[in-house]
Amino acid sequence: MPESIARSGIRLTHTPAVMLTKWRFGMEALPAYELTKSFRLLVALFTIADTRRRSLYCARGCTHACHNLPDPPRDAT
């Protein structure tokens, strides 16, 4: 978790970081000014988890449809 806190750019003493390190859930009940920090922290946590998962399970080729999406269509203008 320290890696996700560092990656999110919030301080260890910010409420969402403290909640996560102490396994306290309920970030949805935080005041509005804490929600942005919570979001940044959770995105960083999920990014790290997904990167680790891909390196373990998708390193030798992957058949997950979400990893093999077609390029988006280009605008004709």
Image: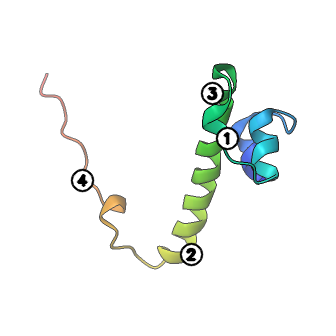
Q: Tell me the element at label 1.
A: helix
Report x, y in % for residue 12.
85, 39
Is there a contact, CB below 8 Å, between mark 3 and mark 2?
no
Residue 53 is drawn in which quadrant? bottom right
Kind of residue indicated by mark 2: Leu
Kind of residue indicated by mark 3: Thr
Count residues near mark 4 (Cα–Cα under 10 Å), then give few for <14, some for 14-19, many for 20+: few
- Which one is closest to the eye, mark 2 or mark 4? 2
Count residues near mark 3 (Cα–Cα under 10 Å), then give few for <14, some for 14-19, many for 20+: few
| Residue at numbered disc 4 | 70
| Residue at numbered disc 1 | 41
| Residue at numbered disc 3 | 36
| Residue at numbered disc 2 | 56
Residue 75 is drawn in which quadrant? top left
Task: Tell which of 23 and 1 is nearer to you.
Answer: 23
Q: Tell me the element at label 2.
A: helix
Q: Earlier in the sequence, mark 3 or mark 2?
A: 3
Residue 72 placement, left or right of 54: left
Residue at (29%, 64%) from the top-left corner? 65
Q: Earlier in the sequence, mark 4 or mark 3?
A: 3
CA gap, disc 1 and disc 2: 23 Å
- Which one is closest to the eye, mark 4 or mark 3? 3
Is there a contact, CB below 8 Å, between mark 1 and mark 3?
no
Kind of residue indicated by mark 4: Pro
Residue at (19%, 35%) from the top-left corner? 74
Task: Check the picture and name the quadrant holding the C terminus.
Answer: top left
Kind of residue indicated by mark 1: Leu
Is there a contact, CB below 8 Å, between mark 1 and mark 2?
no
Task: Check the picture and name the quadrant holding the N terminus.
Answer: bottom right
- Which one is closest to the eye, mark 4 or mark 1? 1
CA gap, disc 4 and disc 1: 29 Å
